[in-house]
Image: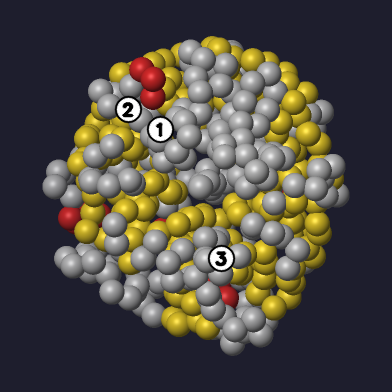
Amino acid sequence: MNTRSRAATALALTLPIALVAACGTETEAPVAGAEPAGTTAEETSTAAPTEVQGRSPRLAVTYDGGIKVLDAQSLEEVADLELDGFNRLNPAGDGRHVLVSTTGGFQVLDTGTWGEGHGDHFHHFTSTPELSDVTYAAEKPGHAVVHDGVTALFDDGTGLVQLVDSAEIATQDGVEEVQLPDAHHGVAVPLSDGSLLVTAGTEEERSSIRVLDADGEEIAASDECPGVHGEAVAAEEAVVVGCEDGALLYADGEITEVTTPDDYSRIGNQAGTEASPIVLGDYKTDPDAELERPTTVSLIDSRDASLELVELPASYTFRSLARGDDGEALVLTTDGDLQVIDPETAEITSTIPVLDEWEEPMDWQEPRPAVLTLDGSVYVTDPANDSIHAVDVVDGEVWASGELGATPNEITGVLGEPASDHVGDDHDH
């Protein structure tokens, strides 16, 4: 079943949990001047594309007042795009575009690098990056999740979920909508069998997840997840959702509680990869802390819903978690080091110095170092020095650094050809 038909089937919902689906060919109330459906970014680009020898991965980095697009190999600036407000970055899923959570919704950023399939190979092109006129309207744009060729956009302000064929993200073609009964800070995960995992709750309280099959029937549910937040997909399409007393695991059609040794044990941010059955998560144990600076991370094994805790030499933040190409668990700690953890043994296998010692700011919106894995490298932002570093995990060293001329906050990247799935989220507040 192709992505478009799977999404359409999953959203023809008459749901026992009072979810109401409204399907259309494009999003409701797009911003003024939005690019019409069917128009490609190539047709609206201000510069003609240039064919290049190979794929050209690019990075997008936010700062106060705009977004910088960088060449991922040289770390040189390709474009500096002005955009007011506190902007957040999300994967788009097509290897070229990025979704910017900004005023009015999820705005599509064309990073200007892509590949076009031709038989058994790609032709690669680059052009000038630009913020397109395409915006997926949202009152409070929240999480975006990419999985199995579908991009799910969650509006915290209305509870509306928009699902898009990831390959059509720049055109707004064939958008499907699911209206949840109550607005809340939530997430939706589209699965390969046409089912959809969603959180349920209100602005005051959220503690539930629901799984709906392709016909809209509820096939699994749990109300045992206080403070539900964040998601990650592991090997064999196992989904882990964080709670304030551990986590929930959805695998093989069943929901299982992941227990922890502490009564309060918030796992609100996770990083998963199809290369590993184990999900990396944060781990907080003080419900009364104004700002807890944890020194322990969690490893959740989706094969048996077991949990291992790993003690680190220093604290970390919600932007510190990532996964390596071979499934390594990566954590950037406040001593400036990148900790490489073997998820199977729960042991730190190497420590790579990257930054000077740093401290997490009190305000979650304030810049702090962030970690991204892309195309075999690990990228670490350095707000204290307005710079960025590229790390080789295998060699255990920083292989490149670049000055940004602005203080970086969030980071994401694209391969320059159809990309792999989103590996988790770094939203916390």
Q: Nearer the viewer, residue 343 or 420?
A: 343
Q: Quadrant of the N terminus?
A: bottom right
Q: Determine contact: label 1, label 2, CB under 8 Å.
A: yes
Q: Give how far across and how far down residue 40 sits, in percent.
A: 26, 59
Locate residue 329, reporting x and y percent: 66, 31
Secondary structure beneath dot 1 equals loop
Q: Could you tell me which residue is drawn at 24 percent across and 49 percent down?
A: 131
Nearest to viewer (mark 3 / mark 2):
3
Sequence-earlier tag: 3 or 1: 3
Quadrant in the rendering for residue 283: top right
Q: Residue at x 64, y 58 (%)?
A: 228
Quick check: 306 left or right of 146? right
Real-space Cα separation, disc 3 to disc 1, in angstroms: 27 Å
Dot label at residue 204: 3
Q: Residue furthest left?
A: 46
The amino acid pointed to by label 1 is Pro
In the image, which disc is placed on residue 97? Answer: none
Q: Residue at x 59, y 87 (%)?
A: 14
Q: Earlier in the sequence, mark 1 or mark 2?
A: 1
